[in-house]
Amino acid sequence: MQITTTFRHMEPSEALKSYAEEKLERVKKYIDEPVVVQLFLTVEKIRHSAEVTIAAKGITIKAAEESNDMYASVDAVVDKIERQLRRFKERIKAHKPTADARERQVQKMIVEAASLDEETGPVVIKTKSFSMKPMSVEEAVMQMELLHKDFLVYTEAETENINVVYRRKDGNYGLIAPERV
């Protein structure tokens, strides 16, 4: 497990870093290798917050907690991540992907809004590539919840079509799927 620790608005502490890394070792049993963990420890006046992002094979999970003590914040965020991973692992057991399912490479682009008014056309200001593993609608909703996103583009495991699942204003979920011809 590769852990990157970032201290914001505070002095780096080797004791705090080793404490957090030791606590994060607990989540290793729930996910497959390789695991990349980003830990952000921030102090703002009396608020001590810990934020964790875990990227592993086929899953990305984010969590954040804050309290009056940095060690308590680390404990709380690790407990939260562990609960999310345990729930994810239990749900995923019933949704095993098929052996012939293939991942797809996808590219995301962010366009600068001011450039849309110009006659030259939009300017791409950020591009991100990632692979999409085939999953069911339930898995896509679960992944969207774990990432705290409003929508998720994914490959449907059975049909291999690219679908979009999104969170509606009423709290339910919507699905955009291509029409079968």
Image (spheres, rainbow, N blue to C red):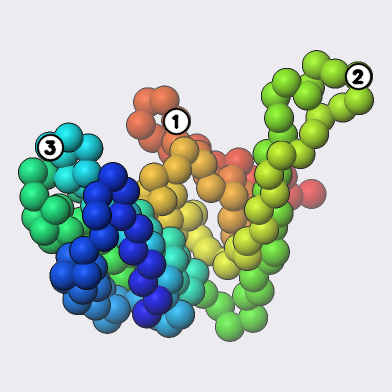
Binning the other alpha carbons within 10 Å of mark 1 as few (below 14), some (14 to 19) or many (20 upward) gives few
Q: Residue 29 carries which label?
A: none
Q: Which of marks 1 and 2 is in front?
A: 2
- The residues tagged by marks 1 and 3 sit, at their Cα atoms, a distance apart of 36 Å
Residue at x 24%, y 77% (from the top left corner):
25
**Residue type (three-letter) at the residue carrying disc 3:** Ile
Res 102 quadrant in image = bottom right
> Does residue 114 lie above or below 53 as drawn?
above
Residue extending farthest to the top is 117
Q: Which of 66 and 139 is in front in this view?
A: 66
Residue at (71, 54) in percent of width and height? 107
**Residue 13 in view:** yes
Residue occupying image coordinates x 22% and y 37%: 44
Q: What element carries label 1?
A: loop
* Residue sticking out furthest to the front: 11
**Left or right of residue 111: residue 174:** left
Give the labeled residue for mark 1. 168
Kindly identify which residue carries mark 3.
46
- The residue that label 2 is drawn on is 119
From what the image shows, is residue 17 above or below residue 126?
below
Horizontally, residue 24 falls left or right of residue 117, namely left
Camera-nearest residue between 107 and 164? 107
**Residue 106 point in image, percent of width and height:** 69, 58
Please determine whether, in this image, residue 122 is positioned above or below residue 27. above
